[in-house]
Amino acid sequence: MKLKFDSKFISLLLMLILVITIVHPIGLPVQVSKMTRGSYDLIENLPEGSLVVYFNDASVGGWASVQWLSIAVLQHMMQRPIKIVILTCIVGGEMSVFLTEDYLLPKVDIGGKEYGVDYVHLGFIPGAEITVASLAEDVHKLLVTDYRGNMIDDLPIMDEFKNWEDIDLVFTNGGTLLQSYVRQLYVPYNIQIIGGVQGTSIQLYMPYYEGGQIAGMLCDIKAAGEYELLMGKPSGAIKFSDLLSIAYLLMIGIIIVGNVQDLIARKEET
């Protein structure tokens, strides 16, 4: 008997399986990759008082792919005794600022950190790569206020952030300016960079990672789930990892059954 896989049937079956997985997570085993472990260790081993620049470069369209990764990394930073400067300078960065204020910071437990002392949101600084270069030279020449309207000269954290010499690590959750960070921050100043990118574009940046220009690489929701496990705080990424794994297994199963049926049909014809 030959099974026929109607597209509507497959869609309904997939939807049913995903709903069941959401209601009753399976908890499939997750193996932490070398890339994720390396990125986690870079932040975990930062000395007390280190300063990290967090570029929230995710677009609205790409946010779904990197939101859990972005949250997990920022949560890890908030748990460490380090300083965090959040900003973006990508084209269209106004929406990235919106994502930071409404979808990133509200989902992170800041613990005992104080705004303006331990972390700050500088908002959108237009200029893309030119801004990155200027930021390394003198950030105080670029800004007068932070995103919330505070004078940066009145913020204690900005007393510790003048130029490239004060930056211990850079993180970005988008690939838009990742190469720019390599050119403007790693090449001249040897500042370590962690790149968080969508799975569809990671092949563009792997040569930089393998060549050492990018110190850490995180890819999509899979890395986010691994990162949550390393922090000991499983959250949304683990659940979505289950969903993706189940969906992939279903598709693989359908492909296998279809190929087996095709082989049997060919043998019967001969």
Image: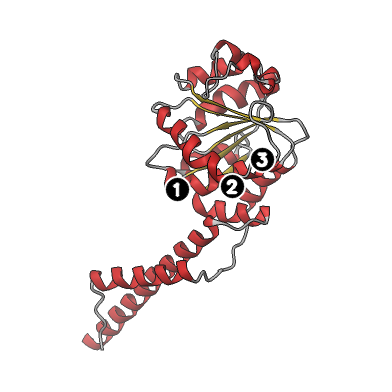
Q: Quadrant of residue 31?
A: bottom right
Task: Check disc 2 and report the residue beneath it.
Answer: 72
Instruction: Residue 151: give x, y in percent of width and height.
Output: 58, 15
Task: Check disc 1 and report the residue beneath it.
Answer: 65
- Gap between marks 3 and 1 measured at Cα: 22 Å
Q: Quadrant of residue 255?
A: bottom left
- Mark nearer the viewer, 3 or 1: 3
In the rendered image, the quadrant that contains the N terminus is bottom left
Is residue 17 visible to the viewer in this orientation of the structure? yes
Task: Check disc 3 and report the residue beneath it.
Answer: 78
- Gap between marks 1 and 2 measured at Cα: 13 Å
Q: Amino acid at mark 2?
A: Ala
Q: Amino acid at mark 3?
A: Met
Question: Which one is earlier in the sequence, the residue at label 3 or at label 1?
Answer: 1
Label 1 with label 2: CB-CB less than 8 Å: no
Q: Which residue appears at 25% of the width and 85% of the height?
A: 2
Q: Which residue appears at 44% of the width and 20% of the height?
A: 126
Q: Amino acid at mark 1?
A: Ser
In the rendered image, the quadrant that contains the C terminus is bottom left
* Looking at the image, residue 138 lies above or below residue 8: above
Determine whether the residue tagged by mark 2 lies in a helix, strand or loop: helix
Question: In the current view of this chain or complex, which residue is farthest to the top?
Answer: 141
Task: Name the disc covering residue 204, or none.
Answer: none
Question: Which one is earlier in the sequence, the residue at label 3 or at label 2?
Answer: 2
